[in-house]
Image (cartoon, rainbow, N blue to C red):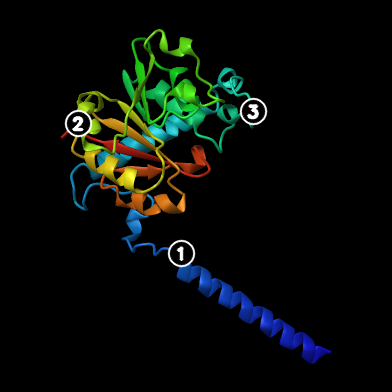
Amino acid sequence: MAAGRKIGDRLASWVNRAKIRAAQACLPPVKQYQSELLSMLCSPAGSADRSAGLDALIATALSAAGDAAKIDLADVSNRMSEGEKWPNIWPGEHYKLLAALVARLQPKTVVEVGTFLGLSALAMEKTLPPGGRIVTFDLLPWDSFATTCLRPGDFSDGRIEQILGDLADPAVFGAHEALLEKADLIFLDGPKNLAFERAFLRRLGTVKFAGPVLLVIDDIRLWAMLDIWREIPFPKLDVTSFGHFTGTGLVRLSPK
């Protein structure tokens, strides 16, 4: 009886080790980086703006996290016709953090990549300063989604505008580069297919911004996004605990 249990235990152990080896063989390799680059990446080592960039991001993240807890997005949540009321959940979702970042930075121009149901745009519009605007890009019109939370009236005063186009396309990006140059905050919530994010971020690095820009990236903890996040050559900070459970990252883009 005891001998049988030992054989069973050994067999189970062997099967578990085999499963682990098989999983490791199937997973894509994660590149090796210096330890200091795993959660935040600045300009190349020794750069004069390394400390300034990180200090600015840390200060922004801490102040926005404190403000997020006090923001009520129940009116945005109530627009949802089904599912959990994500906008008013915090932490674990990024909507309150986005609203807090807008409240803190008071941006005149916000660019969003990925309209979908409009929840992020509505959350940011909640704290947008007078005269500010949110330009949201997508491949599909906002009203093509049956469960959209946007309404025609949301576009009547110019505070929210949708543009259809693929910003990974050089021609589309070039056509809207002047808009990106004026951006104060960019929220990237794209398809997470690697090709789009790499192309967009590469071109974003060539833009001559009018001033410092806060880039917020969604889902940086998804497996497909790990290398994308680590490859970003600008000051950055992982703030997942204050944002989306699938990952939220802040990046500071500076004028050329």
Helix or strand or loop: what does disc 2 sit on?
Answer: helix
- Residue 178, position as x, y percentages in the image: 20, 24
Q: Residue furthest right?
A: 1
The residue beneath circle 1 is: 27
The residue lying furthest to the front in this view is 144
**How far apart are the alpha carbons under marks 1 and 2?**
36 Å
Q: Determine which residue is flagged by label 2.
A: 174
* Mark 1 neighbour density, 10 Å: few (under 14) some (14–19) many (20 or more): few
Q: Is 111 rendered above or below residue 226?
A: above
Depth order, front residue of 190/100:
190
Query: Reading the chain from its start, which is encountered first: label 3 or label 1?
Result: 1
Tag 3 secondary structure: loop
Q: Residue furthest top?
A: 157
Residue at x 50%, y 15% (from the top left corner):
151
Q: Amino acid at mark 1?
A: Leu
Assess whether mark 1 and mark 3 are in contact (beta carbons under 8 angstroms): no
Which residue occupies the foreground of this view, 20 or 166?
A: 166
> Could you tell me which residue is drawn at 31 percent across and 49 percent down?
41
Relative to 144, 233 lies left or right: left
Reading the image, the residue beneath label 3 is 82
Vertically, is 55 above or below 142? below
- Spot occupied by residue 255 in the image (x, y as percentages of width and height): 19, 32
What's the amino acid at mark 3? Glu
Q: Quadrant of the C terminus?
A: top left
Q: Position of residue 157 (x, y in %)?
A: 39, 8
Mark nearer the N terminus (1 vs 2):
1
Tell me which amino acid carries mark 2.
Answer: Gly
Give the quadrant of the N terminus: bottom right
**Image mark for residue 14:** none
Q: Give the quarter of the image for residue 182.
A: top left
